Amino acid sequence: MDIAYISPLLQPVTLNARAVLQEQNERVEHVNFIETGIVSLRALAAGSMLETAMVGCHGAVGVSVALCGEMSMHRAIVLVPGRALRIRTDDLLQSMRERPQIREHFLRYVQSLIIHSSQMALCGVRHELEPRLACWLCLVCDALDGDIVPITHNYISMILGLHRAGITRALARFDQQGLVRKTRGLLQVRDRTLLRRKACGCYGAIASGYDWTKLRESKPPGLGRDPMFCSES
């Protein structure tokens, strides 16, 4: 089994808030399989930053190595603290050579991540604030596999490239509509079904790419939460 094969090579690590796991255009030294928390993948250029995707309990950080790329395509920074299982890149590449199934799983996950990044780029250009915010909150809930989002309005505005005042007004409307409950530094999503209806179509496209519904029905504990190591029907 692929999980059992690489398990001896995995090291548990703590993901501290705001920790940088990888810098853009630097060599990928480790791949991190996220167990809890969220890692934000960000594109940087001329002092500007934008989140292109997020990685939570269904994914991994550093998967560009599956494409034979040594350099990171993003800055990867911990958005919500948690835990991960870490493997040295050289060990993972050796495992891929010895077990082609591992590489195949990675490539499927990379495809899902590309869909995520492409859809977020479209979302940022074409969609209004509230559907875009609802989409992002739905993705956060999926990444955490929960409804409590420990993040401030200011940080959401920075990640999405939107004005903080607009985020605050939108969240106040969401609160009035029974979608979320606001407290200091924390959001509780009260009705994920209604929030998904509020979200733009990008959420459905991204979720379909990962097939999170299937994952929740079949995921074993630990590393099996990652789509690249879930058994296929």
Image (cartoon, rainbow, N blue to C red):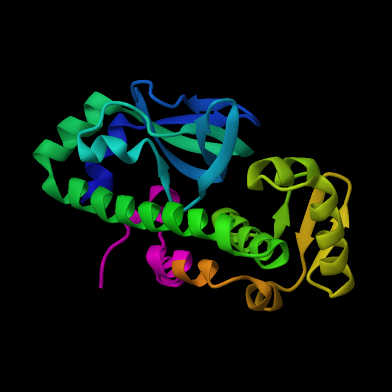
Residue 183 horizontal/vertical position (percent): 88, 52
Residue 232 drawn in magenta = yes
Q: Count the marks: how many?
A: 0
Q: Is residue 134 left or right of residue 39?
A: right
Q: Is residue 46 left or right of residue 157?
A: left
Residue 166 horizontal/vertical position (percent): 81, 54
Q: Is residue 221 visible?
A: no
Q: In front: 144, or 199?
A: 199
Q: What residue is at 56 percent from the left and 32 percent from the top?
A: 77
Residue 75 horizontal/vertical position (percent): 49, 31
Q: Is residue 52 above or below residue 65?
A: below
Residue 101 drawn in magenta = no
**Quadrant that contains the C terminus:** bottom left
Residue range in magenta is 206-233
Q: Is residue 59 above or below residue 50?
A: below
Q: Is residue 228 left or right of residue 193?
A: left
Q: What residue is at 11 percent from the left and 37 percent from the top?
A: 97
Q: In front: 51, or 106?
A: 51
Q: In front: 103, or 54?
A: 54
* Quadrant housing residue 139: bottom right
Residue 21 horizontal/vertical position (percent): 49, 27
Q: Is residue 157 visible?
A: yes
Q: What residue is at 57 percent from the left and 41 percent from the top?
A: 50
Q: What residue is at 86 percent from the left and 59 percent from the top?
A: 169
Q: Main secondary structure of the magenta part?
A: helix
Q: Is residue 65 left or right of residue 152?
A: left
